[in-house]
Amino acid sequence: MDDLKKIHDLARREHIPIMKDDGIAFLVAYLEEHENIRDILECGTAVGYSAIRMAQVRWDMQVDTLEIDPKMYEEACRNIREHGLEDRIHCHLCDASEFQSDRVYDLIFVDAAKSQYRRYLEHFYSNTMPGSVFIFDNLNFHGIVDDPALSGNRGTLQMTRKIKTFRDHLLADDRFETVFYPDTGDGVAVAKRKKSSSFEEQSGKQ
Ligand SMILES: C[S@@+](CC[C@H](N)C(=O)[O-])C[C@H]1O[C@@H](n2cnc3c(N)ncnc32)[C@H](O)[C@@H]1O
């Protein structure tokens, strides 16, 4: 069994919420189709599985990946090292919403705290340029976003209400051209930053 499959299978066995298989296949295919993508930011590393899959698409991919949980971070660093990718995947132990960088990313993959998605979008907007893409996973949250009766847990219901508000906001956000894929992964959206939006034109911002 190859090492990456071991990481995948172990994560599934230990209920570490790595992206669904069809979601990761979609992400990898997106990167293969968009050869201009080189610099990636990932919010939510877990054990490094998606970061490694992304970095393996092309030899010149650079990935900054952010993880808040020290145990996950340690395991991700080990997995990244074992794949010889430590010069191209930089794992940061931090709260994604506090990460500061002056880098401009071609793609920002958001897979961390679901209730913070709006915050991440605004926080990292200045790290994008026209043409940059945000990809969000879990916009269905196991179907609960559209069918709250699937969960009786108050915390989950509060969080899925926030996801719904964010999803509606993103689809209406004039700064992006957004496509929502409800049947991919756990509900994936691809939001591509437009050249300019009416909001930016009015406010003189770029
Ligand atoms: C869904 S998992 C990431 C899975 C990974 N992208 C993959 O598919 O291999 C989400 C991760 O985000 C981390 N996380 C949660 N809140 C965070 C935050 N505020 N900042 C950074 N990481 C966070 C969690 O500890 C967890 O490991």
Image: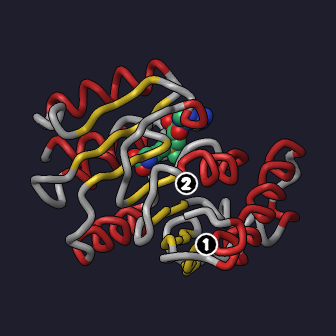
Q: Residues within 10 Å of mark 2 (few under 14, many from 20)?
A: some
Color theme of the render: secondary structure
As drawn, 141 above or below 10 = below
Identified by mark 2, the residue type is Tyr
Judge whether residue 8 can be spotted in this image.
Answer: no
As drawn, 140 above or below 55 = below
Identified by mark 1, the residue type is Arg
Can you give x and y, in whole percent of width and height, for residue 40 in the image?
34, 52
Q: Nearer the viewer, residue 35 or 201?
A: 201
Q: Earlier in the sequence, mark 2 or mark 1?
A: 2
According to the picture, the residue beneath numbered tag 1 turns out to be 175
As drawn, 99 above or below 61 = above
Is residue 134 rendered to the left or right of residue 199?
Answer: left
Q: Secondary structure at mark 2?
A: helix
Can you give x and y, in whole percent of width and height, for residue 183 in the image?
55, 78
Is residue 69 rendered to the left or right of residue 40?
Answer: right
The disc placed on residue 20 is: none
Q: CA distance from mark 2 to mark 1?
A: 10 Å
Judge whether residue 170 can be spotted in this image.
Answer: yes
Is residue 44 rendered to the left or right of residue 171?
Answer: left
Seen at 61% across and 54% down, the residue is: 121
According to the picture, the residue beneath numbered tag 2 turns out to be 125
Q: Nearer the viewer, residue 13 or 142?
A: 142
Q: Residues within 10 Å of mark 1 (few under 14, many from 20)?
A: some
How many marks the image carries: the answer is: 2
**CB-based contact (under 8 Å), mark 2 and mark 1:** yes
